[in-house]
Each structure stands twice: as structure tokens, then as C-alpha cells.
Image: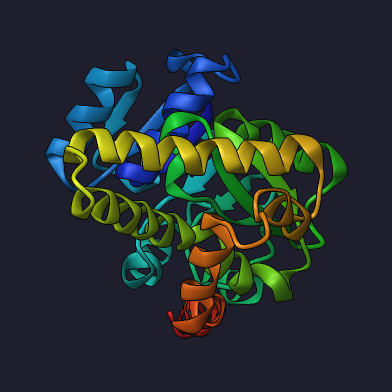
């Protein structure tokens, strides 16, 4: 019997595996993964040393905890494949946007223990942010097990399920918005004469340091903004241009649009 099973060995599963193994939450010999795509299976096997199979049911039958790491469009077919093998004493952790706890229970056709999560791609460098919720069948010990797994590649917070789509908007999708912002900062620097590779380093480090400053000081982001916005200075001038072009409104709309689409998946 394996401690942990992955159904799906794609990028997010690999990000999770890297953190789980690095933090020694589980050893490679305690983990099994399945994927219909042979290169994905081989990549997971070679990189992490886990056991792999193309049979999803083998994972479910032989794992204490199962992580469903599949795209939303394939989720129903996967559940149809594994539901007979699923046991009511198993813990299922899902990273499938838009699929509610009730939907998962309905498709399983039995009462199962489910933790629904929304991680993000910074999990690939152990700096992920994961939102999670669970159904009533999950006990406190199992919640702690889930937290231990999810904190292996970043931070995790449990939230009410009605906030899970907003989690998708504010952290699940926002790395892409952040990369877009970094690219735009670098483009501005390049326009001003800086070499592109150097511009990316300056922009990315500024974003990294700003996020760390916010988290470690606990100060309101507006207060930190005001600290660097001298009267008549360069920063407040740049802020004026951003606000003139609807910067904050655009970001807010992007978060809400991500949440809206998540509900339809």
C-alpha cells in the first residue's frame, strides 16, 4: 500500500511532488502516480523515483491518499473510471478548478472524504499559495495530513467553499498577471536603454522583494506604497499614469473574471 497516489503527472503534480519529496513529507517509495501520457509517466519516474502506471484504478486501489491532478475537461471521465475502486475511508485531494465538493461526491456516487484545493504554479519553486476546503466527512486528523502535504510546496489556507473560485482569481491565475507585469516593467526598462536580460532581473527582484516586504512587515500595501511615494517624485508620477490608465480597476476585473470562468468549468 502506498501512502500517496497521484492521478495525473502533469506540471502541477510534478511541482507538488518536488516539494513533498524535498520536505520529506513522504519518501519516493511511498508514492505512486498514473498518467495516460507515457512521456509524463516516464518523466515523473525518472525525476522523482516514484512508481508509475497507466492504470488510474491501480493508484486508487493501492493508496491511502489520492490526489486528483487532472484538467477539468477530463475530470468526469477519470471519476467514472475510478469510482468503483474508491473507498470511503480514503482521502481524496483535488486540484481541479470549478469542481465543487458536491459535484465530486455526486459523480463518485458514494460518500467520500474530499479536500478541494486550488494551488498555483509558484509551487514549482516551493513558493505556492493554495486555498483549500473540505466536506464534512473529513476529520481533523485528515485536515492536518492535507495541510502537511500542501505546505510541502508553499503556503496553504483553508477557506469556506464559496471563496474557492475567488482563490482561483486571486492566486491561481495571478502568477500569469504578475509575469505580464514583470514583462511590462522590463519592456519599459528596455525602452529606456537597459539590456533585456538585466531588465528582467531588476523587475523580477523588485516584485519578489516587494511581496516579501509586505508579508514580513504586515503593513498595509497602501502604507508601503506611500513610504516610497515622495511629493512630486518619480514614484507618484508613475502611479498617476497607472491610475490614469485604469491599473487597479483592470487588475480587479481580471480577478473577478477568473473567478467567473472558474464557476463554469
In this figure, which colouring scheme has been used for the structure? rainbow
Residue 150 seen in the current view: no
Residue 29 against residue 243 in the figure, above or below: above
- The residue depicted at 46 percent of the width and 74 percent of the height is 241
Residue displayed at 53% across by 50% down = 119
Left or right: where 262 falls relative to 14: right
Residue 42 percent location from the top left of the image: 18, 28
Front residue of 14/208: it is 208
Residue found at the far right of this picture: 140
Which quarter shows the C terminus? bottom left
Position of 46 with respect to 143 (left or right) is: left
Front residue of 211/81: it is: 211
**In front of the other: 241 or 207:** 241
Kindly identify the residue that appears in the image at 54 percent across and 73 percent down.
240
Task: Say left or right for 108 vs 36.
Answer: right
Residue 13 vertical position relative to residue 227 in the rendered view, above or below? above
Image coordinates of residue 153 in percent, x first then y, are 54, 32
Q: Is residue 113 left or right of residue 189?
A: right
Image-quadrant location for residue 128: top right
Above or below residue 118? Residue 248 is: below
Q: Nearer the viewer, residue 239 or 117?
A: 239
Q: Position of residue 107 (x, y in %)?
A: 52, 73
- Residue at the image point whose x is 56% and y is 35% from the top: 209
Q: Position of residue 113 (x, y in %)?
A: 69, 54
- What is the quadrant of residue 248 in the picture? bottom right
Amino acid at each position: 500500500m502506498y501512502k500517496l497516489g497521484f492521478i495525473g503527472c502533469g506540471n502541477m503534480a510534478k511541482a507538488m511532488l518536488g516539494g513533498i519529496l524535498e520536505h520529506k513529507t513522504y519518501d519516493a517509495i511511498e508514492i505512486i502516480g498514473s498518467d495516460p501520457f507515457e512521456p509524463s509517466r516516464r518523466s515523473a519516474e525518472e525525476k522523482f523515483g516514484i512508481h508509475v502506471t497507466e492504470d488510474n484504478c491501480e493508484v486508487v486501489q493501492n493508496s491511502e491518499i489520492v490526489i486528483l491532478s487532472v484538467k477539468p475537461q477530463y475530470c468526469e471521465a477519470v471519476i467514472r473510471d475510478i469510482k468503483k475502486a474508491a473507498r470511503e475511508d480514503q482521502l481524496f485531494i483535488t486540484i481541479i478548478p470549478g469542481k465543487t465538493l458536491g459535484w465530486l461526491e455526486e459523480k463518485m456516487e458514494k460518500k467520500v472524504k474530499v479536500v478541494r484545493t486550488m494551488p498555483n504554479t509558484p509551487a514549482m519553486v516551493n513558493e505556492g499559495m493554495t486555498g483549500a476546503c473540505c466536506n464534512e466527512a473529513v476529520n481533523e486528523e485528515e485536515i492536518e495530513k492535507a495541510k502537511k502535504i500542501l505546505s510541502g510546496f508553499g503556503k496553504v489556507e483553508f477557506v469556506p467553499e464559496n471563496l474557492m473560485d475567488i482563490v482561483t482569481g486571486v492566486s491561481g491565475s495571478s502568477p500569469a498577471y504578475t509575469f505580464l507585469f514583470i514583462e511590462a516593467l522590463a519592456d519599459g526598462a528596455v525602452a529606456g536603454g537597459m539590456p533585456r536580460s538585466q531588465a528582467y532581473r531588476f523587475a523580477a527582484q523588485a516584485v519578489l522583494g516587494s511581496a516579501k516586504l509586505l508579508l514580513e512587515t504586515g503593513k498595509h500595501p497602501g502604507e508601503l506604497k506611500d513610504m516610497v511615494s515622495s511629493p512630486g517624485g518619480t514614484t507618484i508620477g508613475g502611479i498617476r499614469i497607472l491610475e490614469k490608465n485604469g491599473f487597479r480597476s483592470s487588475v480587479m476585473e481580471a480577478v473577478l473574471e477568473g473567478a467567473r470562468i472558474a464557476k463554469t468549468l
